[in-house]
Image (cartoon, rainbow, N blue to C red):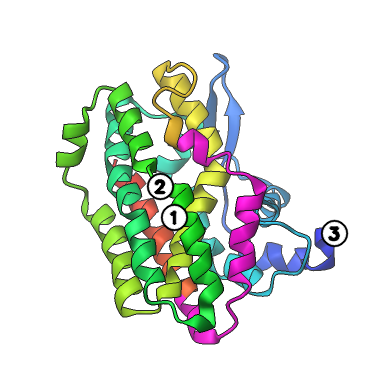
Amino acid sequence: MNLRNFLDFDQVRMAMWHRPARRIEINLSGRRRRNSLDPVDSSDRVRTFINIVRLFGTESVPNFFMNLVLRTDEARREFETHPVALDAIANGLSAERYRKLLLELYPIVWHFNPICGAAASRIEDSHRKVRYFLYEHMQEESGHEEWVSNDLQAIGVSSGEAAAHRPTTSTLTLVGYNYWTADRQNPCSVLGMLYALEVIASVYGGSFAESVRDSLLLTDDRGVSFIGSHATMDAEHMAQLRHVLNTVEDDATQRSIVDSTLVNFEMVTRIFADI
């Protein structure tokens, strides 16, 4: 289906893509770098938006899904245009900074399934499809904290050091917020966490993993197995999230998911800023 059938491109450009973005260029050594002075044409920004839509499937008009993309894309772009994130995605990180990032990712991944489980235990039958989706998703995510641990060991951090690390306030806030919403707010808001994390992984994870591999001279997936694997999630998995989002029809639950998405995007941006 042609995206023009349900996207008003002029409206998208004016409402969503008014802020300057950055451009990846190639320097003389063949390494990618960000040019902070040159704005990207608005059509490039629209393509980024379209790519997010395509990741989640375009065979039908996704009412709430499209609403979620539109209402939270400013927060996504805050991540995309943050100087640390820009440089990391384009040029990778030093070993020290990459260790810091993985040490912050470890508790997020460790707590991912417990958060989903806490949410699933409170979801009523009116949203049973969300609950069933979480059951399946938790199985797929099981053990992924070990991938982060393996990556840390590949760059010189033992599993004991990872377990003893005290996360930054931003990481604690992200984890604590998602537990709080699962227990005290609307448990379906956990979909906002999933959406934010999967968009970041799918849109930026591949370039980031490649840049880290190049900057640290890593071979194959050694040291980047977690980020690299989550950047290549299949289209069916992404389409499942789009589908379950579109089963949510009541305004209160939709607002909770939007709020959760905004907070999770902001916290991930702060985590990158902290490194």
Residue 263 point in image, percent of width and height: 39, 65
Dot 1 crowding, Cα within 10 Å, few <14, some 14–19, many 20+: some
The residue labelled by disc 3 is 1
Q: Are marks 2 and 1 in contact (CB under 8 Å)?
A: yes
Magenta span: 227-256
- Distance from the alpha carbon under mark 3 to that under mark 2: 35 Å
Element at label 3: loop
Residue drawn at 54 percent across, 40 percent down: 231
Q: Amino acid at mark 3?
A: Met
Q: Earlier in the sequence, mark 3 or mark 2?
A: 3
> Toward the viewer: 220 or 49?
220
- Distance from the alpha carbon under mark 3 to that under mark 1: 31 Å
Q: Is residue 273 above or below residue 263?
A: above
Q: Amino acid at mark 2?
A: Ser
Magenta region includes residue 189: no
Q: Which image quadrant for residue 65?
A: bottom right
> Toward the viewer: 181 or 147?
147
Q: Which image quadrant for residue 92?
A: top left
Residue 166 point in image, percent of width and height: 16, 46
Residue drawn at 69 percent across, 47 percent down: 44
Q: Which mark is residue 138?
A: 1
Residue drawn at 36 percent across, 55 percent down: 112
Prevalent SS, magenta region: helix
